[in-house]
Image: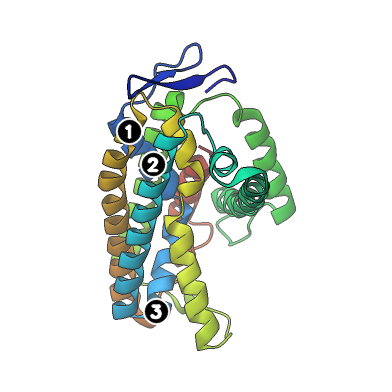
């Protein structure tokens, strides 16, 4: 919302005034937004995490991440009803924890976002490399050039939308990641997995488990933008409806992808699903392009 967007309680009901041109999102639109925002490139690391944890621990970890994210999402929704003017986590911290809490909230939020953007930049760069790779296995672009091009594209597109107006973009993003995952799964089920794509650094069992859990937690993370989503809804009090529908869908997608790849590849399960595809092949270039579009949105 724009800077003059305001919120107020009138007669016990929440009345919101959105900025010019914003009508507010309905909760089904927010479901699509949550799925598109959370089911990002993190799903590509889920099979490797399942391989590191094993079947039983993976099921427990997926269920635990789902419950933790549902609880924290519902908690944010309840807190925002008490502080309807809050648009970000920093605003919420300022209203509930005071000045020191606000400082900690803002610093923590933007430090997290900085690291998150770094991760997305890596995915954009590697996806662009895969898209432009040659049939002889040559990546075509160096990492620095690929990251530079990705950053330039982001600078152009990042500030030309609001959450409400990115509904069509979210649909395109979701379609891109679904098709990319489908192509990867199709290749794995028909061609299997090579040992080259499954190489993992020998850091010991403890670090492998820690890395796998971190991958699953990262794959579920979306709370940093939940406040902004509620701020652009027609009825923010219905945000919990979107959570109850979106999060089970996300858990099902992760369980399906991780389970299929691990069952098909076993010890050759790739750390990163894109590594299961032959470098420079038409399939690899197509999936790389789809991942670039998805991550860009």
Q: In whole angstroms, how far apart are the C-alphas of marks 1 and 3?
A: 38 Å
Badge 3 element: helix
User: Is 26 placed above or below 288 here?
Assistant: above
Q: List the single residue furthest toward the top.
A: 20
Q: Are marks 2 and 1 in contact (CB under 8 Å)?
A: yes
Q: Is residue 204 left or right of residue 65?
A: right
Residue visible at 60% across and 29% down in the picture? 157
Q: Secondary structure at mark 1?
A: helix
Q: CA distance from mark 2 to mark 1?
A: 7 Å
Q: Position of residue 256 (x, y in %)?
A: 27, 62
**Residue 254 x %, y %:** 33, 60
Residue behind mark 3: 53
Characterize the local packing of mark 2: few (<14), some (14-19) or many (20 or more) Cα atoms within 10 angstroms.
Answer: many
| Residue 220 in the image, given as x and y percentages of width and height | 42, 56
Q: Tell whether 228 sits left or right of 158.
A: left
Q: Is residue 277 visible?
A: no
Q: Disc number at residue 237?
A: 1
């Amino acid at each position: 919302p724009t800077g003059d967007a305001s919120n107020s309680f009138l007669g016990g009901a929440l009345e919101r005034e959105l900025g010019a041109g914003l009508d507010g999102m309905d909760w089904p639109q927010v479901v699509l937004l949550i799925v598109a925002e959370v089911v990002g490139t993190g799903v590509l690391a889920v099979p490797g995490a399942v391989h590191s944890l094993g079947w039983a621990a993976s099921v427990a970890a997926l269920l635990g991440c789902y419950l933790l994210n549902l609880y924290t999402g519902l908690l944010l929704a309840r807190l925002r009803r008490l502080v309807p003017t809050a648009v970000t986590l920093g605003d919420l911290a300022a209203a509930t924890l005071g000045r020191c809490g606000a400082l900690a909230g803002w610093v923590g939020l933007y430090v997290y976002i900085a690291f998150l953007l770094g991760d997305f930049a890596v995915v954009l760069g590697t996806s662009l490399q895969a898209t432009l790779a040659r049939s002889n296995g040559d990546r075509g672009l160096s990492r620095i050039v690929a990251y530079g091009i990705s950053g330039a594209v982001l600078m152009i597109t990042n500030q030309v939308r609001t959450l409400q107006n990115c509904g069509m973009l979210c649909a395109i993003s979701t379609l891109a990641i679904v098709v990319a995952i489908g192509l990867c799964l199709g290749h794995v089920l028909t061609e299997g997995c090579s040992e080259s794509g499954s190489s993992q650094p020998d850091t010991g069992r403890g670090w492998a488990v820690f890395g796998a859990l971190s991958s699953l937690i990262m794959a579920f993370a979306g709370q940093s933008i939940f406040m902004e989503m509620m701020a652009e809804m027609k009825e923010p009090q219905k945000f919990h409806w979107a959570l109850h529908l979106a999060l089970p869908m996300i858990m099902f997608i992760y369980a399906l992808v991780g389970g299929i790849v691990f069952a098909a590849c076993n010890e050759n399960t790739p750390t990163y699903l894109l590594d299961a595809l032959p470098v420079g092949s038409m399939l690899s270039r197509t999936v790389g392009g789809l991942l670039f579009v998805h991550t860009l949105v």
